[in-house]
Amino acid sequence: MRPRSPAGATALLGGAGLCLLARAASKRSQRLDLREQVVVITGGSRGLGWLLAREFATAGCQVAICARDEAELGRARQELERHGAQVLAVPCDIADRRQAEGLIEQVTAQFGRVDVLVNNAGVIQVGPIQTMKVEDFEQALGVMFWGVLYPTMAVLPQMLARGSGRIVNITSIGGKLSAPHLLAYNAAKFAAVGLSEGLRAELAPAGVGVVTVVPGLMRTGSHLNAWFKGNRRREFTWFALGASLPVISMDAERAARRILDATGRNQAEVILSPPAQLAVRAHGLAPATVTRVLSLVDRVLPSADVTDPGASRGIELLQQRRSLLLQGLTSMGTSAARRFHQFPDPSKPEERNPQR
């Protein structure tokens, strides 16, 4: 048999490599039939998490939701069941490793497996760095980094054993560029983006898909559950406007449908709104310029009030500020809050104090 030339051997190896890559890409691109899939959604009692639970349930999935508040979970479960869903509601602090692992164990015991994990739980703290404490960063990372890693690590063994599964990480535009007065939130979201992208690269050959979702501002009503420090009323005003006005913010129901579609298609990354897409592209092309622009933005944001170290929840500030103009401009956000279970109970002491 005539020996192959070095060039021929190289071409053969290259062709084999391309075939393997094509097969892997084909496997990754296969659309997942969501019917009868078991889906776990953290932070699923309100806002985007509740909307995702509704969308997955409508698609024929068996849904498990978790949150810390049992009463909120009960209300969310009842409404989802009215949509015909089979729902398991599990009280859980996702920042606690044992509780996160227990969540996956309980869902697996109930439904036999977990096909899709949606890491959605979050907390928002707004204010200049002078008003923030180390505990604020610890809380943000606890919910939005460790609260992503813990359930992911708990569910991975069964997904790897089956050679299938989806992990959907709800990150943020704050994980792509760091806006002022949101540093604890941004730090946690940057960590979540890095984890999510690395997981996709490592898990793709094993058949487990990882989808990184990058929302911009959305009309979920989350500004009522955010925590504000410094000049609290002014901080609430700019954040509430950004989370409520059309064009700037995205309709949350449309966002949930896009996330559902991206999950089925195993899309690597989905950036949900045109403003967010523009910001990510600009930062990628000219990060120094974008940072200078953000520094200019910081100059028009409220100055630090370091004499008042306390924090107030958005719902409290909304009730204190009787401004018809603000109420009108944020009416779309308030309407979303009512529809998506975002009105908190300010009488609960554990909800009045975000510090650990």
Image (cartoon, helix red, strand yellow):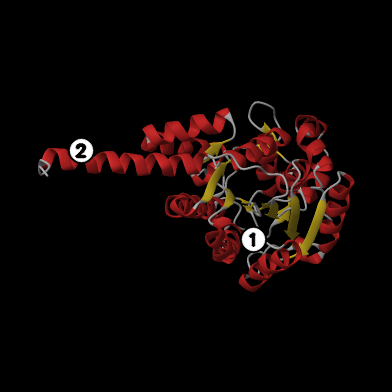
Image quadrant for the N terminus?
Answer: top left
Image quadrant for the C terminus?
Answer: bottom right
Left or right, residue 188 beside residue 335:
left
Whole-percent x, y for residue 172 in the image:
56, 44
| Pointer 2 local density, CA inside 10 Å: few below 14, some 14–19, many at least 20 | few
- The amino acid type found where label 1 is placed reads Pro
| Pointer 1 local density, CA inside 10 Å: few below 14, some 14–19, many at least 20 | few
Judging from the image, what secondary structure is the residue with disc 1 in?
Answer: loop
At x 42%, y 42%, the residue is 23
At x 35%, y 40%, the residue is 19
**Vertical placement of residue 32 versus 156, above or below:** above
User: Looking at the image, which is closer to me, 132 or 198?
Assistant: 198
Whole-percent x, y for residue 179 in the image:
52, 43
Report whether residue 189 is seen: yes
Name the residue that disc number 1 marks. 309
Residue at the far top: name it: 247
**Nearer the camera: disc 1 or disc 2:** 2
User: Looking at the image, which is closer to me, 301 or 284?
Assistant: 284
Q: Are marks 1 and 2 in contact (CB under 8 Å)?
A: no
- The amino acid type found where label 2 is placed reads Ala
User: Looking at the image, which is closer to me, 287 or 193?
Assistant: 193
Q: What label does residue 11 carry, if any?
A: 2
Report whether residue 198 is seen: no
Whole-percent x, y for residue 326 in the image:
77, 34
Whole-percent x, y for residue 233 in the image:
71, 45
At x 64%, y 54%, the residue is 115
